[in-house]
Image (cartoon, grey):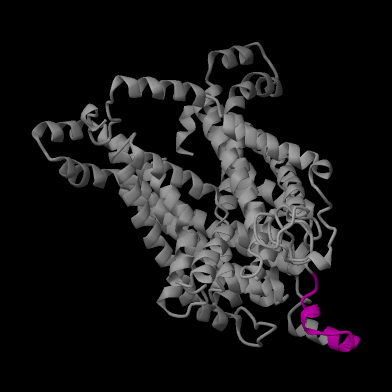
Amino acid sequence: MTARTLTVEGQAPVRGKRYRRARKSWREFRRWPVIPLLLLFLFVFGAIFAPLAAPRSPTLSNLRDRNTPPVWLEGGSSTYLLGTDQQGRDVLSRVIFGARVSLIIAVVAVSLSLVAGTALGLVSGYFGGVIDEVIMRLVDLIRSLPFLLVALVFVVVFGQSFALLLGLLSVTAWTGYARQVRAEALQLRERDYVLAARIANASTFRILYRHILPGVVSTITVISTLQVGGLILAEASLSFLGAGVPPPTPAWGSMVAEGRNYLQSAWWIAMFPGMAILITVLAFNFLGDWARDQFDPRLRQL
Amino acid sequence: MSSFITRRLIALIITLLAVSVLVFTLSRVSGDPRELYLGEFTTDEQWEAWGRQMGLDRPLPLQYLVWLGKAFTGDLGNSLREQRPVTTILLEKLPATLQLGVAAFVFSVVLGVLLGVLAAVKRGTMWDYLGRTFAILGQATPPFWLGIMLILLFAVQLSWLPSGRRVGLNSLILPTITLGWLAVAANLRLVRSSMLEVLDSEYIKLARAKGVSATGVVWRHAFRNALVPPLTQAGLTLASFIAGAVVTETVFAWPGMGRLAVEAVNQNDFPLLVGAVLTISFIYVAMNFLVDISYGLLDPRIRYS
């Protein structure tokens, strides 16, 4: 192999024919984000059908069985595949139910911020002027705040609630859309078909909705897939700090926080929810990268 | 140039004011401040007296200005729990946060740049693949979980390293890795793509044609120019590190400002929380501003955008 490779710094090495052919078939397969889609399917399926998918209830505590190890370790049993936590609740079931919170976050927060961010981005880009300045200042302002801290203060003031969590995440996330959509709108409004529509005396709303909006759809899709992972991580961090979904709803972040006290005796309580977060975010990120490469490579710097 | 700085300065002041207004509003929304200090058995007269003393009978905007003025002079009130000035407590915690922030910054820059250069130079090979895998994993790992797993592995199972708490230099290692992990991944990607772009450019081809050695091309010619985007990104990273690595400090019981804020939340120590959040936000915004300015100094194209 070494004899058949020519290496220049910064350029992909030139290799022999058999290697290239093998790589080509592999690349064709990898065109599609198979594994991420599979994982995400599991995630969504598990979250929606949690009562069916989970072996037992996530809140049912059986104090006699507390801190049982996962089934492949000594002392584990097949009733609790991933062990139990400090209150005797099945870890596997809690992880599956925890996916619900993450899924709702992913769907609702992204949707809200998408709508708000796109609308404001379109308005900002199309109209320009004072409106543009104001909206962009707002975006800069929100982006310059340290999210976790501000969220903590809100939770202290208003108490832990699902709605608050979604609100905080959405208010932070819409800025990600607004900037890109604005940039797109700035370009699109100079297009011929837009000018034609304006000459034909189309209403502004019509122009925005029917002519400019379709042009930003691919950008929005890519941004959404890229944002989801970050939102799930943000929710997990907040839950970890005790500022996420209120108990007893199982959430991956708070499960890790609970497991922290039992690292020496029952490390599985903290490990498996964390792994769930990792795998889910990883899958979303892969999907996002693929979407970006497919639809809008210009967004590469994101 | 000076108009650039002026514009940024105005934006800075507006942002700082907005942050202070937000914090102040939130602190009042949560209830009457007197409730923090007075219990059930206060008489109406005492309530009124306290109100006058705290200036609660004045119009709200005036109260805000008074509060802001006090904060400006360093008076952030007293912590409920410790009965000490908030500012003193914050200053005590500052060194710990700075230490962790700078350590994580150095770690993320050094490792990120090295791995990024490696991935770019050896593009398409195993090193590149490993580097990119590492980057992708790094950006998907929840930082608190990473910290806990590191503690599990190195402190609990292997007992090689302490689990934080800032006892001795060893205890800095795990928190630094945890905090810097995501930044390493981000830097790696950035350096790699930046290097690849530079290595493709004309003057590098010229250098090679001249006969400059491979190492020479990489380090003497390409490296410097590839560094600009990562450096500016690194500046922002430093800002976020110093602005309270809230989660990392909590996981490793690191006595810094971020953890202080979380403790204040748990202990319902409102003055402390408000003071901590205000200070940390200010630092964060101010550092972003400095990074912006230096970015403008480095890259003239930015000044005119």
Q: Residue at x 58, y 35 (%)?
A: A223
Quick one: A181 or A299, which is closer to the camera?
Answer: A299
Quick one: B231 or B7, which is closer to the camera?
Answer: B231
Question: Which stretch is magenta?
Answer: B31-48
Is residue B296 shown above or below A36? Answer: below
Q: Residue B32: within the magenta?
A: yes
* Numbered label tally: 0
Q: Residue at x 67, y 14 (%)?
A: A201
Quick one: A211 or A66, which is closer to the camera?
Answer: A66
Q: Residue at x 60, y 77 (%)?
A: B70
Is residue A135 shown above or below A164? Answer: above
Is residue B117 shown above or below B179? Answer: above
Q: Is residue B142 left or right of residue B53?
A: left
- Where residue A250 appears, as percent x and y from the top left, is 76, 55
Say whether residue B279 is visible: no
Q: Which image quadrant: the N terminus of chain A?
A: top left
Say whether residue B164 is visible: yes
